Amino acid sequence: MMLEGKTAIVTGGAHGLGRAIALRLADDGADVMVADLLGGDAEAVAAEVRTRGRRAVSYEVDVSDSGAVSGMVMATVEVLGCIDILVNDAGVSGESPLLDMKESFWDRVMGVNLKGNFLCSQAVAREMVARGGGGAIVNITSTAGANARPGASAYASSKAGIIQFTRVLALELGQHGIRVNAVGPGMTLTGSEVKPAPSQKYQGAFVGQVPMGRAGVPGDIAAAVAFLASPDATYINGQVIFVDGGYSAGKLSVSG
Ligand SMILES: NC(=O)c1ccc[n+]([C@@H]2O[C@H](COP(=O)([O-])OP(=O)(O)OC[C@H]3O[C@@H](n4cnc5c(N)ncnc54)[C@H](O)[C@@H]3O)[C@@H](O)[C@H]2O)c1
């Protein structure tokens, strides 16, 4: 129960990795604000958290909207008392080659993934500092933030931006006792109801480049987030942990 007495906001907590992270933080003792664009689905996850004996609330938020993000922070403090942990999980993906890409696609990916991360981090960090400092922010990047692939210029750039954003915040907020780190999942099969699983062909090609020979499962990612949020990681700041079975360590050699 490393997170006993702590309060966490998980954005994108209604589905996929965010849901797994919310439940894992609760299992480790935290009370949780489940925040998501899909308010009803967020409330269903909050209800799951409550059945595990923790306090939980939900909030319908678009992380790219500063007013909505302020409301999320105020609601969390009002109901749960304070904020110790922020997990910036909310994100959108999608592919579009440069020559065909619509401006609206680029703006949406950047708006949710990168601006959303900025807005939530700023609002929560201000709250943490106002209460005397201390806290942990865990951003969800991706192997795509370090390994380029065709068609992913918007998504990969947003996730690369999150890596550098994480490092800059670590430098700025360390003096306030706030640690900022990131987790970079490789391909992780979530069974999400709102995001289709990658094609079998893509899965096969990806797993072929994973030294451990399998895709990730949500618990792999949630465990890394819980560690970085916990007192065990008290001197870890400004780091990115890729949770990808070794995918980003380098290319598997082709023998023969
Ligand atoms: N699953 C993977 O293989 C994988 C790999 C690398 C990185 N990631 C990252 O992990 C995070 C979660 O991915 P996932 O696979 O669980 O996706 P998902 O689509 O299953 O879940 C994303 C959640 O974010 C919410 N969301 C989307 N836009 C939002 C907004 N504007 N405001 C608030 N909430 C919003 C969605 O409603 C959804 O509940 C994302 O940041 C994604 O880029 C996932």
Image (tube, rainbow, N blue to C red):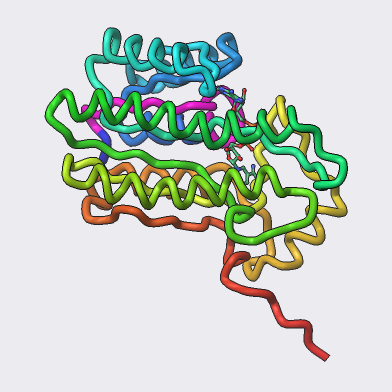
Quarter of the image with the C terminus is: bottom right
Instruction: Give the residue displayed 71% in from the left and 26% down from the top.
Output: 193
Which quadrant of the figure has residue 172?
A: top left
Out of 92 and 26, give the one closest to the viewer. Answer: 92
> Where's residue 200, x and y in %?
85, 50
As drawn, is 202 to the left or to the right of 169?
Answer: right
As drawn, is 74 to the left or to the right of 36?
Answer: left
As drawn, is 94 to the left or to the right of 10?
Answer: right
Quarter of the image with the N terminus is: top left
Q: Which residues are magenta?
A: 4-19
As drawn, is 185 to the left or to the right of 165?
Answer: right
Instruction: Give the residue displayed 30% in from the left and 48% down from the top.
Output: 170
Q: Is residue 90 above or below residue 38?
A: below
> Where's residue 184, x and y in %?
53, 51
Instruction: Give the residue displayed 33% in from the left and 20% down from the top.
Output: 54
Which quadrant of the figure has residue 69?
A: top left
Out of 157 and 53, give the one closest to the viewer. Answer: 157
Instruction: Give the residue displayed 37% in from the left and 22% down from the top.
Output: 32
Which quadrant of the figure has residue 64?
A: top right
| Magenta span includes 16 | yes
| Magenta span includes 94 | no
Q: Count the numbered circles shown.
A: 0
> Where's residue 65, x and y in %?
51, 17
Which residue ends up furthest to the bottom in the rendered image?
256
> Where's residue 38, x and y in %?
60, 15
Determine the quadrant in which ligand 1 lies.
Answer: top right
